[in-house]
Image (cartoon, grey):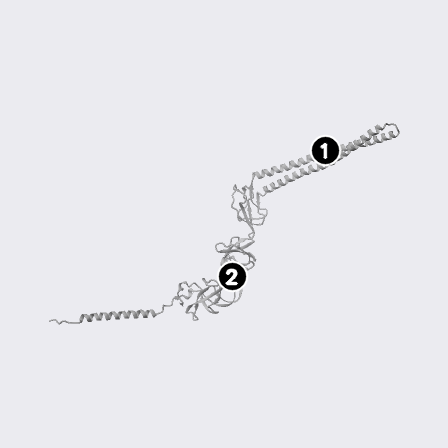
Amino acid sequence: MDVKREGVAKRKMIRRVLYLVLLLAAVALAGWRVSLVKPAVPVVEASTIWPDTVKRGPMVREVRGLGTLVPEDILWFQAAFDSQVTRIPTRSGDDVKPNTVLLVLSNPQMEADAVDYEWQTKQAEANLADLRVRLQSQTFDQQSAVSTSQGELKQADINKDKEQQLFKAKLEPEINVRLAEAKWEQAASRFQMEKQKLDIMKESVQAQIDSQKVQIEKLRATYKLKKKQVEELTIRAGIRGRMQEMTLQVGQRVKPGDILAKVAQPRKLMARLQIPETQAKDIVVGQRAQIDTRNGIIRAHVMRVDASIVNGTRAVECKLDGPLPKGAVPDLSVDGTIEIERLADVLYVGRPVFAQPGSPGTLFRIDADGKGAQRVAVRFGRASVNAIEIAGGLNAGDRVILSDMAAQEQTARVRLN
């Protein structure tokens, strides 16, 4: 017969609880041990980093910018009158001399006006010649009248003397003497009047001639102006250089102010650089510069700094002090470096890609054995194109990583493999 066993279920329950407690304790212990384990140090390939050594000594502050070569002197030709293009003997890229004709314009109305004023001037000159003849004839007539009155005055004077002598000899009555004296006075008055008329006529003659001369000069000046305007329809270079731009076509109409052509001197070039506004604040006129044309480096100096900012950059114009290398032409892309100042004794290192002047940052300092690197806080000072001043956090001789370590941003230490 079966024997009833008591307490078996209870013991099984106790064992299960005990096993569960032991399992939970083991899991907790394992989690605690795992939490004590430090994360693995990330490995960085040594061949992929850009190391540099902190140095103490002189540092040259420079800024760099891209730009182009542009002519120093550019002559722009603008249309002065409404006209039409009739001939274009010179095209873009052609070398020109001062008398080289760039293009020929036409304006029939201006040409007709010039011809009209030319004939008006000739007509006025002919009128002046005719006026001189007529006035000279009138002057001769008046001179003749003066001579006649003068002769009559002499006759009256002789007649008066005769009558007075006869009266004294009591051969003529007194009335004849008075009549002779009256005729003499009349002749004298007529003679004075004719002389005055001659003097007035001479002044009138000169005034009329001067008036006609003024009219001629006015017409002549207008004719010269019209003729010059017609001549200006033939556009000449005016300087020795090269045609830079010519976009007109024969038959095209132009109006005052339209650009006709652009001529520049290709051997007198300057560099126009675009410098970031944050770096351009220290640039002043006269600073030394170097312009890299990819075919040689030219010495230069700053001659103008544009006051306006366009797209985050300022234009800086540099005058070239050295000869141009072969292949240097307008619009050639160049790379310019401008020297800001020379620092005598500073702590500096190659400029990291993320470093900003006058701001804090961090760098990985390479261990002495070269097998690892530790992140350290540094403070940057003044910056140049390829170097930056270390104001704190590093010492001379320290080796640091300059390349971008953004992938290890949250890591305080790396291992170099």
Q: Is residue 290 above or below residue 219?
A: below
What mark, if any, has residue 138 been given in the picture? 1
Q: Amino acid at mark 1?
A: Gln
Mark 2: which amino acid? Glu
* Residue holding disc 2: 62
Q: Position of residue 322 (x, y in %)?
A: 56, 58
Q: Is any atom of residue 120 visible in this view?
A: yes
- Residue at 51% x, 61% y: name it: 62
Q: Please give the name of the residue rendered at 58% of the width and 39% of the height, measured from the top-left corner.
A: 111
| Secondary element type, mark 1 | helix
278 left or right of 34 in image: right
In the rendered image, the residue lying farthest to the right is 169
x and y percent of residue 92 in the render? 53, 48
Q: Quadrant of the C terminus?
A: bottom left
Query: Residue at the spot x=65%, y=36% of the render?
Result: 124
Q: Work out which quarter of the rendered image holds the N terminus and state it.
A: bottom left
- The outermost residue toward the left is 1
83 shown above or below 188: below
Give the SS element for disc 2.
strand
